[in-house]
Amino acid sequence: MAVATSVQSVPSAVRRAGSLRLLLSRVGHDPTAAGGTAFLIVVAALALLAPVLSPHDPYAIVDRPLRPAGEQTVLGTDDVGRDLLSRLLYGARVTLAVGVGAALLTAGIGTVIGALAGFYGGRTDTALSGLVNVMLSVPALPLALVIGAFVEMSLPILILVIGGVSWTSSARIVRAETLSLREREFVASARALGAGDGRLILRHILINAMPPIIVAATLQVATAILAESALSYLGYGIQPPVASWGNMLQNAQRYLRRAPELAIYPGLLISLTVVSINFVGDALRDALDPARRGAPNW
Amino acid sequence: MMRIALAVLLACLALASGVTRTSAQAPKPGGQIVHGSVQEPDRIWGPVTGLTVSSEIGQLVNGHLIEIDDKLDYVPSLATEVPTIENGGVSKDGLRYTFKLRRGVKWHDGQPFAAADVAFTHSVLLNPAMDVRGRVGWNKITKVETPDDGTVIFQFSGVDAPFLDRVATLGILPKHILGSVPAADLKTHKWFRAPVGLGPFVFKEWVPGSHLVLVKNPSYWKPGRPYLDRIVYKIVPDANALLNQLETGDVDTRVRLVNEQIETVQKLPNVRVVATPSVTPWLLWMNHTVAPFNDKKVRQALAHGVDKERIAKTLLGGHVTPAWGLLPPMSWAYNPSAPKQAFDQAKAKGLLDEAGWKMTGDGVRAKDGKRLSFEIANIAGEQERVQVLSFIQQQWKQIGVDARIRAVDVGQMWGRMLPQRQFEMAYSYTGRLPDPDMSSHYLSPELKPTTNFAGYANPEVDKLLLAASATVERDKRKAAYQRVQQIVADDAVYIFLYWLNGTTVLNKRVQGYKPAPGYNEFWNADEWWVQ
Amino acid sequence: MRTFLIRRILAAIPTLLAVSLIIFLLLHSAPGGPMAVYANNPNVDPEDLRRLEQSLGLHDPYPVQYAKWLGSMLTGNWGVSYKYARPVGAILGERILATLQLVLVSLLIAAVIAIPVGVLGATARPALQRVVGAASMLGVSVPTFWLGIVVLLLLSVKVRLLPSGGMATIGADFSLADRLWHLLAPAAVLATLEIAGWSRYLRSMLLESLGQDYIRTARAKGLAEWRIVMRHALRNALLPLITLLGLQGGRLVGGALITETVFSWPGMGRLLVESLAARDYPVLMAAFMLMSVLVIAGNLAADLTYGVADPRIRLE
């Protein structure tokens, strides 16, 4: 499960947390980020309104299998005979739920571990870093596969699994941030005023570490969506008859000759969604880190 | 006028005979076939493998005492005749089988075949160091006698009615190669991946992940056979790629074609498609020890609520045949007048009402506060499964039954849910031998049936089944099984859905193939030839 | 440096043990096991199943099973596959060669394409940069297996340009051209992620180093721009790329797994998927451990080159 772009963690530069308007104007001026945001809003709306918008029940058989677009269906039927459009709409809910859920989980776990490791240092740090090392030593996809083979995959469990194998990059970011912020003056003065550890971590350090955490979490949604689709493709993710964009691709390879659109629609949606998230995340990162403002955004 | 008519008639006859003569060609020796398979074999000996492809190769290189033909009859192979009660090969009480072996048969390495090889094979089967999958039936043999090189006698402690089926699938092992191997090394011996056998084809090479090559056995016991010089068994794990290769002619034959490709293949100009009936039924298992399946009326109602004809014709494209019981119509014990719960929604609703399950406001029936709702366990994977189950789910919704589909994996299903009866309903196929013995599915649990996961217990059925297993006389067995079929069909023990026909694709130049119901597709490969 | 290396290798050992324990517990926590599927076989009764599981040692208590497995792994006896009854080492050996071929060729393709793209991204006109940027973003966003399926659809099903799977044309003699032809599609698909990631990274590294003083000096001296880029900036940007590669070991393993499945490539990734389905524990454990070793080695290499590239950076 990879961080979408480069190996550098988000550089800890001057925090301009709070200048939301600046942020929005930056994103707004960047065509790719603007486009990405628009697409994501549309997808999220479609997913939320799926019960209203779907022409059919996604589990119901409406016609012969593998029929092309016709009177019954807008996009045709899948290999069981269910309406493709309805399944894509409901699949959006599942895929987005997994993406956002896993990203939140990753951010949560990573933040807790990273903050503890960075703040307390010493043995806590060594122990937690050791844990991070173990996680980093295991290839993520095979691990998720093995878990998926032996545990019954439902939506919450899938979120747990994906979130559980991808938190290391968040942890590293938060740890680095905590380490650098720990020594800052405002922390020292707060401590002098009698603030306890918990308060220090939560109120002072993490608040300032928020921007890179948010950026990482945003990009993590993309990673989680890709992970869900890979796992479901291999058969170890969301199980049919529940629809997800990933598992709609599961059998699509068999029907490549007869009905290639079975493979094209879900894959296209996944790609566009992930690309949009990446554009938005990149724009966010640039907006929050002035050191990178020099070059035009890729 | 008459003379013209006569001339025309003669001309037509000449033409007709000319036409028929070209279509009824004589088999030509020589040539090779490339067979494509998505799976790779593991060990080439039936008892230690679960893979059909391994048994297929085994059919080509290993020898058997008898074989099963396309009519499900036994034919002699390495034995000179099939033992029966009439010819004295089987004792009246069914406890003694005598096989007379063919003389002059040689192993692929030139050594002579003898009765000692058969006895040795049996000892390997029962050898605790061998990981033989199933010993059912073989463990009833108390003694194997070899009074001379050409005779083998099996002595049983109890009747094993399907014994001849088992013999037909047991490849003979060479004592002169494996006899001196220490027990611990036996199961990993390279013979199982490079067999020296008695079959029509000789193993030549195996490139793992790629292909196997088998060549003609020049000293096969059947004169003039096999016709083919070579069979290349190609491993192409991707079904789409295999289809491409059939199209280009890189692959000549393929068995067990996946259903979604049948339409595409039928349009290809260079191949023909042959449907093979099967003895393996697909069914819904119901757990009789839990509600609502402990009520016969509910089971019958559910059976009446499924439109099998529509599933077979429309959903699965006509590639399957509806099934109504454990025995296929081609079985000698089949009872055509056993009750069938035909699709009848009114009847189904009536039965449910009678059983006390009344319709409620949300469309699902309820009784004593409990909803008529249950889970159907299904092994995740194949598309037919999901298709069929979704369809049945919809149909049952119309009579007020709420069925939920739950995907589980193989280990869950067969390791826990079914054997420990921790399920409500499950959907799967069930493995069957050609022999009609129904004990495995219908004997009461305390009599230790192998696959009665439903938990069905009926003393009358037990009596009939035990009596049928205790004799080898077909008439007696047939009468018993016919009565059993009546009872269990009425009891709706299982809901049988369909027989999954196999589909074989052959390049048009391949001749001689005959479909075999549920048995090995290569059963008569020694009769195949190419134009 | 040497102490660092030794320390890291020693640290890897408990890590590997922990990994093996996790996988072992996972495998054995689930019902079923490798013999479960035979419950449906009319020739197999519960007695037989018990006997088979016993012979595989599956009824021993877990600590005993684990200890046995550990002992045999360390003494070089990697066990025998349940499914194939062949030594696991032999099976792994065949498969890992196939995966190595795939991965190495894909890395080659990635390097050949990523470097010019990265350079373009740093030096070309802004409009062109945007286009290349969007393309590389697409590269990291498209699911690998979907890309593979689309490639198969376009280049193998619609047009018979490329083979639709396998390592070589069967029956034909070994030919390098034939092998490469089969390698092309899967290696290219596997390379996409790397290309996109590397080119982005290279670009940002280049931009950074192109802003440095010594570059300005070179420009002032009148050296041609492209020569400046090539000889100075690029050299500095390349080494961290190797770091990046090392850290992506885990993802490369996962990506290879998916690509192998799509293209029916007989490598380690597919072996894992197959042995998972068959519950072939010995193969599964060994394959997983091997993958972990590769990932750890990649991480180690990354840390080493990271330190070499920038001695200012304190190694953790």
Image (tube, coloured by chain):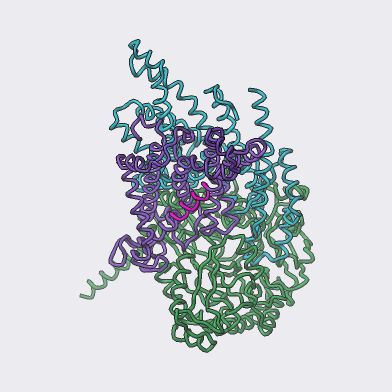
> Is residue A129 highlighted in magenta?
no
Q: In the rendering, at what x and y percent does residue A172 appear?
A: 55, 38
Query: Which chain is represented by green in the image?
Result: B
Q: In the rendering, at what x and y percent does residue B354 appear?
A: 52, 89
In this view, the residue farthest toward the front is A193
Q: In the rendering, at what x and y percent does residue B520 appear?
A: 56, 61
Residue at horizontal 44%, vertical 83%?
B345
- The quadrant holding residue C268 is top right
Q: In the rendering, at what x and y percent does residue B239 appear?
A: 46, 52
Residue at horizontal 71%, vertical 38%?
C76
> Is residue A101 highlighted in magenta?
yes
Q: Say above or below: C214 vs A100.
A: above
Most foreground residue, C82 or B397: B397
Q: Say above or below: C167 vs C10.
A: below
Span shown in magenta: A96-107
Query: Which chain is represented by cyan in the image?
Result: C
Query: Which chain is represented by purple in the image?
Result: A
- The quadrant holding residue C15 is top right
In this view, the residue farthest toward the left is B1
Residue at horizontal 42%, vertical 49%?
B245
Q: Is residue B68 visible?
A: yes
B335 relative position to B4: left or right: right
Pick the quarter of the image with the C terminus of chain A. Answer: top left
Most foreground residue, B15 or B462: B462
Figure label count: 0
* Helix, strand or loop: magenta stretch: helix
